[in-house]
Amino acid sequence: MIHYHQVLSHSHAIRFSHIFSTLPFDIPIPAGNEPYYMLSNYASFLSSTREECCLKFYSWNYDSCAGITPATSNKFYPDWITNTFTCLNDGNMPKYMLVPENTDWYLSETKANCCDRFYSSAKERCMGNVPDEGAIASSEEVNEWYVKYDIMTCVQNSDDSAEAWDHLFDTKQACCHDRLWYAEESCLQT
């Protein structure tokens, strides 16, 4: 979606951001039909190029505004779509991760760095050392732990009793340390 309109004026085009417009984007609009608030403060709203307009008003989504397809990256990113607790480097990361201001946060040089940042409590699973839930047969034991605050300990999720909002850990130690840090010793003993 491009958020600018082109205004024909004095043989050159002036572009302005028109956030609330219902008109299709990139439609020439005759000079004088700009909204009054834009004309009264033209230095703030009018731009001479599409790129200038996109930089001024949509820097957070510049590539989309400017009609540019961002270059993909072979760096690792968190895969939140499939909910597999892993980091991928397939170049199919969401576009917001490729915005220059976001790349340092979302993209990592190594899988280990990505797993540390986004899946620290399930790092072994993220690194591929623990199979994901889809790969575990129902007859096999599941080695996932979650906190049960009513009994102040971490329990194994062997019967899938964890709720969707329960954070799962690879070990009881990790669960006690992260969720019951104030009673960690007691949690580990029960």
Image (spheres, rainbow, N blue to C red):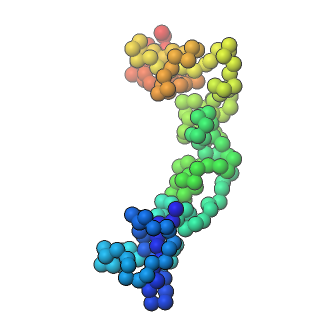
Figure check: 102 above or below 190: below
Give residue 55's position: percent from left, percent from top.
Answer: 48, 68
Seen as rendered, the residue at the extreme top is 190
Q: How many marks?
A: 0
Give residue 149's position: percent from left, percent from top.
Answer: 40, 17
Give residue 60's position: percent from left, percent from top.
Answer: 48, 59
- Say if residue 55 shows up in the picture: no
> For this view, does 98 lie left or right of residue 5?
right
Task: Using the rendered view, name the quadrant where residue 138 is placed.
Answer: top right
Residue drawn 48% across the image and 10% down it: 189
Of residues 74 and 26, which is closer to you in this image? Answer: 26
Give residue 185's position: percent from left, percent from top.
Answer: 45, 15
- Say if residue 80 shows up in the picture: yes
Seen as rendered, the residue at the extreme bottom is 10
Residue drawn 49% across the image and 67% down it: 24
Figure check: 34 above or below 173: below
Residue drawn 41% across the image and 66% down it: 21
Figure check: 176 above or below 117: above
Residue drawn 58% across the image and 14% down it: 158
> For this view, does 72 lie left or right of residue 32?
right
